[in-house]
Amino acid sequence: MLAGTLRALLRAALAVGALSALSALGVVAAAAQTAVDLQLVLAVDASGSVNEERFELQKRGYVAAFRSPQLARAIGSGPARAIAVTMVQWTGPALQVQVVPWMIVSDAASMERLAAAIAAAPRQLYGGGTSISGAIDHALALFGAGPFSGGRRVIDISGDGRNNRGRPAAEARDDAVRAGASINGLPILAIEPDLETFYRDNVIGGPGAFVIAAASFATFADAILKKLIIEISDGEDMRPVAKASSSPDNSSGD
């Protein structure tokens, strides 16, 4: 009888100990989550209209931006003094590749690691249409997949054409906004001079959403640096954009 009671007490003590250990592990896991001011998905157009020269100009623009002292100051201006960044190449509705994994950027060394990762990422998509909606849907699914917590969730779409594959861009935009993300746009006007209007009406959305257009691929670097500084700086400073009606969508082209 006594032996049975002792065994029961021992089992209870072991159970309590196991629960305490699991609880402690949970606390450690939560502590391991790095707080960030911004979770940023960089979605880069790799459709057929973007030839190798243009693609490299885009990539070099991002690399230069993350080596900029101005951007370093912007990253250091938030409460957490850190952001999380990933990069995606996109073309058609189901053609997206995460070419740079989520990386936490908080100082000069981590900025250089991200810049180097972007520079080393090869082009993985060629053609397949221009599905901005597919890019938004894919980007939205990436949030919450890294070892960080908090911060605004922003999808940064750059491209040189209208949505011409998949569902309307405005539908994907509205779904992303309802899920708590903001979408900013960097239209490249080399092929479609009125693309900025399409982005304003169909692509951007959420608190503080904005468009910064690049007149050509050659001016992309200046535009992306300016855009990233605004995105990374306090979101309260972003110019709010009212929800706009949709422009004609899914036009032909690549």
Image: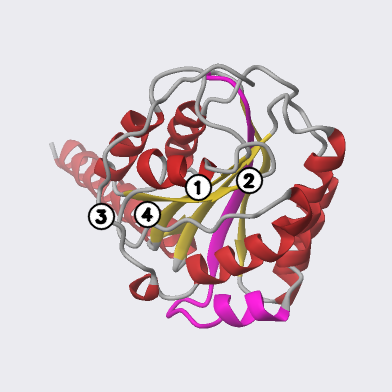
Q: Are marks 2 and 1 in contact (CB under 8 Å)?
A: yes
In front of the other: 132 or 179 = 132
Dot 4 falls on a residue whose secondary structure is helix
Q: Give how far across and how far down residue 43 sits, in percent.
A: 58, 42
Neighbor class of circle 3 (other Cα within 10 Å; few <14, some 14-19, many 20+) is: some
Gap in angstroms between the C-alphas marked 3 and 2? 23 Å
- Please tell me which residue is depicted at 64% across the width and 74% down the height of the picture: 71
In the figure, is residue 215 to the left or right of 55? left
Which residue is tagged 3?
A: 242
* Between discs 2 and 4, the one toward the N terminus: 4
Residues shaded magenta: 69-93
Was residue 81 drawn as part of the magenta stretch in this picture? yes
Which residue is tagged 2?
A: 189
Q: What residue type is labelled 4?
A: Gly
Q: Give how far across and how far down residue 201 sits, in percent.
A: 36, 42
In the figure, is residue 59 to the left or right of 42? right
Mark seen at residue 196: 1
Which residue is tagged 4?
A: 26
- Closer to the eye: label 3 or 2: 2
Gap in angstroms between the C-alphas marked 4 and 3? 42 Å
* Between discs 1 and 3, the one toward the N terminus: 1
- Please tell me which residue is depicted at 50% across the width and 27% down the height of the picture: 163
Dot 2 falls on a residue whose secondary structure is loop
Q: Which amino acid does label 1 sit on?
A: Glu
- Closer to the eye: label 4 or 3: 3
* Between discs 3 and 2, the one toward the N terminus: 2
Residue 56 higher or lower than 60, as above or below? above
Gap in angstroms between the C-alphas marked 1 and 4? 47 Å
* Between discs 4 and 3, the one toward the N terminus: 4
